[in-house]
Image (cartoon, rainbow, N blue to C red):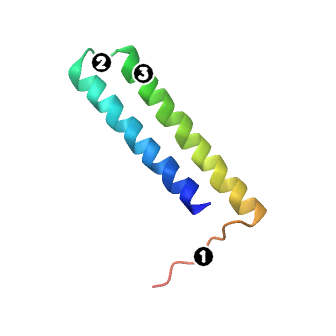
Amino acid sequence: MKVFVVVLLLAIVASMGQALFAMSSGPTTSPRMVRALTLRVSLSVALFLLLLLGWHLGWIEPHAVSR
């Protein structure tokens, strides 16, 4: 589960980098940038749902922050 979360986070960061490169090297409404940002949002939603599912099924457990 942890490995899958890390892979999704890295894919989100890579998609953000791809969108930044597309934005800086062309028009701001380029299809490449729109696809990269759509992929990032989709991956972020998938990660959120995966975390909720993992919590619901007991695969991950939240813990209190100690002070």
Q: Which mark is residue 40?
A: none
Examine the rendered structure and indicate whether residue 30 appears above or below residue 42. above
Identify the mark nearer the N-term, 3 or 2.
2
Examine the rendered structure and indicate whether residue 64 appears above or below residue 57. below
**Residue in the picture at 29% in, 31% down:** 20
Q: What SS does tag 1 mark?
A: loop
* Residue occupying the far right of the picture: 57
**Residue in the picture at 22% in, 21% down:** 25
Q: CA distance from mark 1 to mark 3?
A: 37 Å
- Which residue does the numbered mark 3 point to in the structure image? 34
Q: CA distance from mark 3 to mark 2?
A: 9 Å
- Which residue does the numbered mark 1 point to in the structure image? 63
* Residue occupying the far bottom of the picture: 67
Q: What SS does tag 2 mark?
A: loop
Give amino acid for label 3. Answer: Val
Q: Which mark is residue 28?
A: 2
At label 2, counting other C-alpha atoms closer than 10 Å, the crowd grade (few under 14, some 14-19, many 20 or more) is some
Q: CA distance from mark 1 to mark 2?
A: 42 Å
Identify the mark nearer the N-term, 1 or 2.
2
Is residue 5 or residue 49 the one in the foreground? 5
Give amino acid for label 1. Answer: His
Determine the image quadrant of residue 26.
top left
